[in-house]
Image (cartoon, coloured by chain):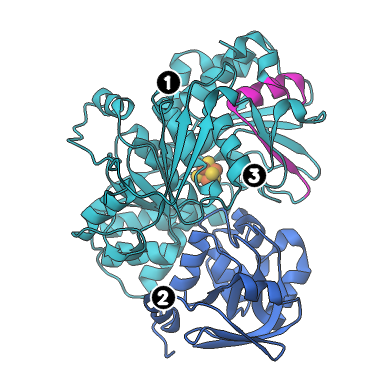
Chain colours: A blue, B cyan
């Protein structure tokens, strides 16, 4: 499974209240949810993710609430790949179970700057950043399989 | 090699002996869902043509985040959830006014020691207070659990936290957990199961243990638990509930880290905006004037918390220009506080009491902040925009700190008020 795009880089401990405020939790459609993605930080990050499709975080990305809107709003905005130094557990599960490609790789995440072109091969555990190749430990096979088929509910061709 | 509590409980569910790092596909004892996620669950079930559930008797639905509904959309998803319960024969619907899921699940005895709870809420770690384990999950996987009964989990590594000695007067369980967060940070226990032990654990009542476990998620933990002991046994005796011989961690269980806390050194602590782990001893803060004080939430909205605040506010008035919101964590808490005269004391002091539930905690309703306003809150999170406004600032402290601060109009050490130091 491969994913690519242009990186939007955010910092450490980015929480789900910032990614998707609780007052919009009753918004159910991912396209509609995407309108509120990163709303507390202003409109730029939202526009950059829509254009680039890759989110890169620091440590503990997606900490806080269990709201899966933080993941599905990203998907609704066209995100295809999320790379971070580490993830909060529930955000990570939500990504896997909704078929969003996630990579845990401290060195890789540190090597990516805002606007870099990134391409990752999840099964091989390799990524190129502006043409330079990096290696990362791939996800366990059980989880890779789940991501490739599109998550728990949406079987799709890998 | 012995087993941690997480390993024991997940082994029972897996039907074989499992240890940290193993993947299992299991049916948790409980699958709880809330009004803020019920619309999504309905959407997944409908889109996938699910017409019967694997185990409706393991499901409970709680209306706490939108209780009572304040927008047509929130009212709509609550209606969708009620219809869903009716259609699928889900008998446990705790509707508006019953309280916060974690509180109701523990105080009513629904969750028993040794069980595993899943809930579409990150603060499900709270239920670990009864020697159980609980974790938050997302809506897609909750809908999947409703439909299929089983879901993948990984057995977590565990951390042992030893609480030693005795707390000093004026310090509380909230101050203990804030002190831990200060040291271990918001990523100190990512993915791990936190077990509280130590010679000091016996002094913490069940409500205090709920506070300790509640903020386990703020360290990133999957589970946070206090193993079953005499305090837990008494809780179930009072409920006339049979618990049998609940599992406890083995003495030779494997922990990836051990942390110890000398309780005598814990002082009133405050977490300052916008990081939960940016924690300071209250005496070291500069003057912080406040606009709002919030007493409530699954962290500190229990009877004992309201009683502490009432002790401080009795016969006094909160500062002019400050609004203090009191949101009992459940209807049972509310009724007990009414019967004890605590609600009257708080209202006389100038507090506003709101519907049992989450209240203003998540910035959805019932007390959102205006731009640049400052709130002292007994809750667990002070993220940017959490209480509805990106420029508002949230400080976190104990119920005593919240009450003392409301009285003075600025963040105040509760030890400066004689009634706060028994
Ligand atoms: S009280 Fe606050 S932290 Fe607790 S479940 Fe409700 S919104 Fe979440």
Indicate the position of residue B177 as horizontal and vertical percent values: 55, 36
The span shown in magenta is: B391-413
Crowdedness of circle 1 by 10 Å Cα count: few (<14), some, many (20+)? some
Mark closer to the observer (1, 2): 2
Mark closer to the observer (3, 1): 3
- Looking at the rendered structure, whether the residues under marks 3 and 2 are on a common chain is answered as no
Subunit that carries the residue with mark 2: A
Subunit that carries the residue with mark 3: B
Indicate the position of residue B307 as horizontal and vertical percent values: 52, 18
Crowdedness of circle 2 by 10 Å Cα count: few (<14), some, many (20+)? few
Relative placement, left or right, of B175 versus B87 is right
Alpha-carbon span between mark 1 and mark 2: 50 Å
Indicate the position of residue A37 as horizontal and vertical percent values: 66, 67
Q: Name the mark on residue B120.
A: none
Q: Is mark 1 within 8 Å of ligand 1?
A: no
Subunit that carries the residue with mark 1: B
For label 2, the SS is loop
Indicate the position of residue B112 as horizontal and vertical percent values: 27, 39
Alpha-carbon span between mark 3 and mark 2: 31 Å
Query: Is A16 within the magenta?
Result: no
Q: Name the mark on residue A140.
A: 2
């Amino acid at each position: 499974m491969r994913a690519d795009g242009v990186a939007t880089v955010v910092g450490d401990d980015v929480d789900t209240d910032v990614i998707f405020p609780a007052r919009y939790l009753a918004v159910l459609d991912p396209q509609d949810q995407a309108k509120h993605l990163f709303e507390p930080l202003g409109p730029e990050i939202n526009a950059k993710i829509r254009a680039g499709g890759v989110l890169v975080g620091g440590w503990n990305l997606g900490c806080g609430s269990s709201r899966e809107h933080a993941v599905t709003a990203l998907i609704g905005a066209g995100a295809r790949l999320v790379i971070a130094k580490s993830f909060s557990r529930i955000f990570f599960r939500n990504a896997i179970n909704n078929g969003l490609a996630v990579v845990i790789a401290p060195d890789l995440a540190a090597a990516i700057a805002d606007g870099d072109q990134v391409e990752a091969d999840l099964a091989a555990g390799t990524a190129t950043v502006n043409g330079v190749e990096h290696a990362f430990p791939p996800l366990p096979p059980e989880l890779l399989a789940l991501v490739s088929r599109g998550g728990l509910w949406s079987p799709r061709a890998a | 090699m012995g087993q941690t509590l997480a390993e024991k409980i997940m082994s029972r569910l897996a039907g074989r002996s499992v240890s940290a790092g193993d993947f299992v596909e299991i049916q948790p004892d409980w699958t709880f869902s809330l009004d803020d996620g019920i619309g999504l669950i309905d959407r997944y079930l409908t889109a996938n043509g699910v017409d019967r559930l694997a185990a409706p008797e393991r499901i409970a639905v709680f209306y706490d985040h939108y209780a009572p509904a304040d927008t047509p959309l929130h009212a709509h998803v609550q209606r969708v959830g009620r219809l869903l319960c009716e259609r699928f024969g889900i008998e446990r619907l705790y509707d508006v006014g019953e309280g916060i899921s974690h509180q109701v699940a523990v105080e009513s005895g629904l969750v028993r020691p040794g069980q595993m709870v899943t809930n579409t809420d990150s603060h499900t770690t709270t239920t670990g207070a009864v020697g159980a384990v609980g974790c938050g999950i997302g809506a897609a996987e909750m809908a999947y659990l409703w439909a299929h009964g089983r879901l993948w989990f990984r057995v977590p590594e565990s951390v042992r936290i030893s609480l030693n000695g005795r707390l000093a007067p004026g310090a509380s369980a909230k101050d203990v957990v804030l002190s831990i967060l200060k040291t271990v940070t918001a990523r100190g226990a990512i993915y791990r199961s936190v077990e509280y032990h130590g010679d000091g654990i016996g002094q913490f009542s069940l409500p205090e243990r709920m506070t300790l476990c509640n903020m386990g998620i703020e360290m990133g933990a999957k589970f946070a638990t206090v193993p079953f002991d005499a305090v837990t046994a008494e809780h179930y005796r009072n409920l006339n509930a049979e618990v049998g011989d609940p599992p406890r961690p083995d003495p030779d269980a494997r922990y990836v880290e051990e942390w110890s806390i000398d309780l005598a050194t814990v002082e009133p602590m405050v977490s300052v905006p916008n990081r939960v782990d940016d924690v300071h001893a209250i005496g070291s803060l500069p003057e912080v004037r406040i606009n709002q004080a919030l007493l409530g939430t699954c962290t500190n909205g229990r009877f004992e918390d309201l009683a502490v605040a009432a002790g401080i506010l009795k016969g006094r008035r909160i500062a002019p220009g400050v609004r203090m919101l009191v949101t009992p964590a459940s209807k049972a808490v509310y009724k007990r506080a009414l019967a004890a005269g605590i609600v009257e004391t708080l209202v006389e002091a100038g507090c506003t009491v709101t519907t049992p539930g989450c209240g203003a905690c998540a910035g959805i309703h019932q007390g959102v902040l205006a731009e640049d306003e400052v709130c002292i809150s007994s809750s667990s999170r002070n993220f940017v925009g959490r209480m509805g406004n990106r420029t508002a600032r949230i400080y976190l402290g104990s119920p005593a700190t919240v009450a003392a601060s409301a009285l003075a109009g600025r963040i105040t050490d509760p030890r400066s008020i004689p009634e706060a130091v028994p």
